[in-house]
């Protein structure tokens, strides 16, 4: 009973802090630009903390420790991939995307290719990826609240939906920028303090590490099929998928210029590196003290249950309340970011020209749709771990937006037909693989592995299709391609002399 | 008596003839020369970007294959922790940060070179 009280306090505290920080931004949120991207005036350190706060989702906070507990060494690649994805993003797309001046990937598609068809296809993909990513956040919330307070399964997700919608309604993106920067530090503290305490307890007891005999400690010892292929394909999906995540991209438009966008990405890599040391501690200690969770539905609750298992009594309860609060910070921040991005795309593409007020109202209405549908899906129950579902969202993003962005920025030969055929190929193949993995009959051997880790073969295929399709339709290279590419690559110090690209800024 | 006036040859400015058309205009109007400037900027930035990616992917592949192939590494321990865990769990991160730092520096250097090219002549 007592541990429930502390968890309830933790969840309430995070909720109140999130709403309070959000409402601070309210007074300054006046224009549509504020709503979408905080008027692009956020400094790199705030922005980097906000990017990290938004990015560290249920998968990072709960999922990695659960996977480590179940499968061991190979799962260390999840956090490495999440971090390396930012490095790829920094190197390939951060500055040019910021300079393109677009709000979303569909905007970028239209600026670069001038095609409404590509724009619409990209919009559908943003919504699909966003929903696929939102479902595990809401399931994580449900799991956390019922494991820690005994609340019914529908309550956790509903609480997250309500807080996110209130926050979006009062302030849009600016409020979320500050809320999320704060949430990075909340999440770090919520894992760091228990990790240090529990590590010290383990050390003081002169306890041993988990048994090495079962291969759990060994590379490729997860017991899954074709572990080397699965590991490599996962790395590809996460590294290349990061740049295509809707909530990550929109966040980079809040940098003042392209140079700051790169620097923000570099700070993010540092912040993530610090955070990702912690799930490993929980996974390893979890294997030692909570071995019965391995492979079960509660594996994702490892981080939540470990403090009380190792430290019965008040200290364990307090630490349990702290990690519960941190977990809620994770669900709230990621769900907010995804909701804003999906709502932005829905509002922009569903809406024609309207007055400013009605467009903001449309944005609020879209936010409701954006989170209500994933909430309904999250109630249907899951067979895969949180981090595994999020991995599928990365695979879908890597199979569609990564080729579009990389070729659009670095190759002048890309045409609208090539991009469209590529997006459809990647979306259909990776989308079907995701669907079969999530709801289809369980498959074994190579078919199962290729479907559950599709990135390694789908991403090269989509690159080939986009390049081939563009080469076959060379006459359709946009006439203004040089003008657009200059805008993407020239430093802002020169940009005053250059023509603006607001063709799509409707 | 009037102050002495030194008369010198303005070598530095003489070497740079005043441009009839400023380079930024070449780009703006997309002349053949402007296309050339753009192509050279994109080439240098593409090289920097792909070098950063190659470094990242090369590092991860090398570590993945090394830890998978040399299973005997699993028995080597540092401070009681198996070597593969140290490599993938800890050591990879600072190297990723280092690659990121170099990528930012290289890209900014290319941009400064391009800006200098635009402002000289």
Image (cartoon, rainbow, N blue to C red):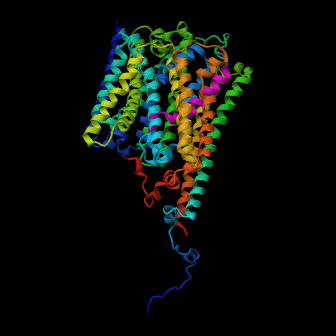
Residue drawn 52% across the image and 75% down it: B18
Q: Residue furthest bottom?
A: B1
Is residue A244 on the magenta stretch?
yes
Residue plotted at (68% across, 10% down): A213
Q: Position of residue A358 (x, y in %)?
A: 26, 38
**Residue A404's x, y, as percent?**
54, 40
Span colored in magenta: A225-249
**Horizontal relation, residue A8 to residue B118: left or right:** left
Q: Is residue A426 above or below residue A1?
A: below
Question: Vertically, is A129 above or below B112?
Answer: above
Whether the magenta-drawn stretch holds residue A203 is answered as no
Name the residue: 60% across, 33% down. Answer: A459
Specify the quadrant that holds the N terminus of chain A. top left
Q: Is residue A282 visible?
A: no
A103 w.r.t. A242: above or below: below
Residue A146 appears at what percent x and percent y? 39, 11
Residue A482 shows in this picture: yes
Magenta portion: prevailing SS class: helix
- Front residue of A311/B42: it is B42
Q: Nearer the viewer, residue A96 or A500?
A: A500
Where residue A206 sits, quadrant-wise, is top right
| Image coords of residue A351 (percent x, y) | 33, 38
């Amino acid at each position: 009973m007592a541990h429930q009280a502390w968890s309830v306090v933790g969840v309430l505290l995070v909720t109140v802090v999130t709403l309070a920080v959000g409402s601070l931004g309210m007074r300054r949120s006046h224009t549509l630009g504020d709503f979408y991207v905080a008027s692009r005036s956020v400094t790199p350190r705030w922005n980097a903390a906000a990017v990290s706060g938004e990015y560290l989702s249920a998968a990072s906070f709960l999922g990695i420790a659960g996977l480590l507990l179940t499968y061991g060494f190979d799962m260390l690649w999840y956090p490495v991939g999440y971090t390396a994805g930012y490095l790829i993003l920094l190197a390939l797309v951060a500055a040019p995307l910021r300079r393109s001046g677009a709000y979303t990937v569909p905007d970028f598609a239209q600026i670069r290719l001038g095609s409404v068809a590509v724009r619409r296809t990209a919009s559908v993909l943003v919504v699909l990826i966003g929903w696929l990513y939102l479902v595990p956040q809401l399931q994580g919330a449900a799991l956390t609240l019922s494991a820690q307070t005994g609340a019914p399964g529908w309550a956790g997700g509903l609480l997250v939906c309500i807080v996110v919608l209130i926050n979006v309604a009062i302030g849009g993106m600016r409020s979320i920028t500050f809320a999320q920067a704060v949430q990075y530090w909340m999440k770090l503290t919520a894992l760091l303090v228990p990790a240090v305490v529990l590590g010290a307890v383990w050390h003081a007891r002169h306890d041993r590490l988990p048994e090495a005999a079962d291969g759990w400690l060994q590379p490729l010892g997860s017991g899954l099929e074709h572990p080397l292929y699965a590991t490599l394909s996962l790395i590809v999906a996460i590294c290349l998928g990061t740049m295509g995540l809707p909530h990550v991209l929109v966040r980079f438009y809040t940098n003042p210029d392209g140079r700051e966008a790169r620097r923000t990405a570099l700070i993010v890599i540092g912040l993530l590196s610090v955070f990702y040391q912690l799930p490993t501690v929980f996974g390893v200690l979890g294997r030692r003290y909570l071995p019965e969770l391995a492979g079960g539905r509660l594996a994702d609750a490892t981080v939540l249950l470990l403090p009380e298992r190792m430290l019965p009594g008040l200290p364990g309860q307090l630490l349990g309340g702290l990690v519960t609060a941190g977990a809620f910070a994770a669900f709230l921040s990621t769900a907010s970011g995804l909701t804003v991005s999906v709502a932005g795309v829905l509002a922009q593409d569903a809406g024609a020209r309207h007055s400013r007020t009605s467009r903001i109202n449309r944005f609020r209405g879209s936010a409701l749709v954006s989170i209500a549908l994933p909430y309904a899906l999250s109630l249907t129950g899951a067979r895969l771990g949180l981090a595994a579902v999020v991995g599928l969202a990365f695979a879908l993003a890597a199979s569609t937006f990564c080729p579009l962005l990389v070729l659009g920025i670095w190759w002048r030969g890309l045409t609208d037909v090539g991009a469209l055929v590529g997006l459809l190929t990647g979306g259909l193949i990776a989308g079907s693989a995701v669907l079969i993995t999530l709801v289809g009959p369980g498959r074994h051997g190579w078919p199962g592995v290729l479907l559950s880790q599709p990135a390694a073969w789908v991403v090269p295929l989509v690159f080939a299709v986009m390049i081939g399709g563009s080469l076959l339709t060379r006459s359709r290279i946009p006439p203004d391609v040089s003008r657009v590419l200059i805008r993407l690559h020239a430093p802002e110090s020169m940009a005053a002399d250059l023509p603006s690209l607001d063709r799509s800024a409707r | 008596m009037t102050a002495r006036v030194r008369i010198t040859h303005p070598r530095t400015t003489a070497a740079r003839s005043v441009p009839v058309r400023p380079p930024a205009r070449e780009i703006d109007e997309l002349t053949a020369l402007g296309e050339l400037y753009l192509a050279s900027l994109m080439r240098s930035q593409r090289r920097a970007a792909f070098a950063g990616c190659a470094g990242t992917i090369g590092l991860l592949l090398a570590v993945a294959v090394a830890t998978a192939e040399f299973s005997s590494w699993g028995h080597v321990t540092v401070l009681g922790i198996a070597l593969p865990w140290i490599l993938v769990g800890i050591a990879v991160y600072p190297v990723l940060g280092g690659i990121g730092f170099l990528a930012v520096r290289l890209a900014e250097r290319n941009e400064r070179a391009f800006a200098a090219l635009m402002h000289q002549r």
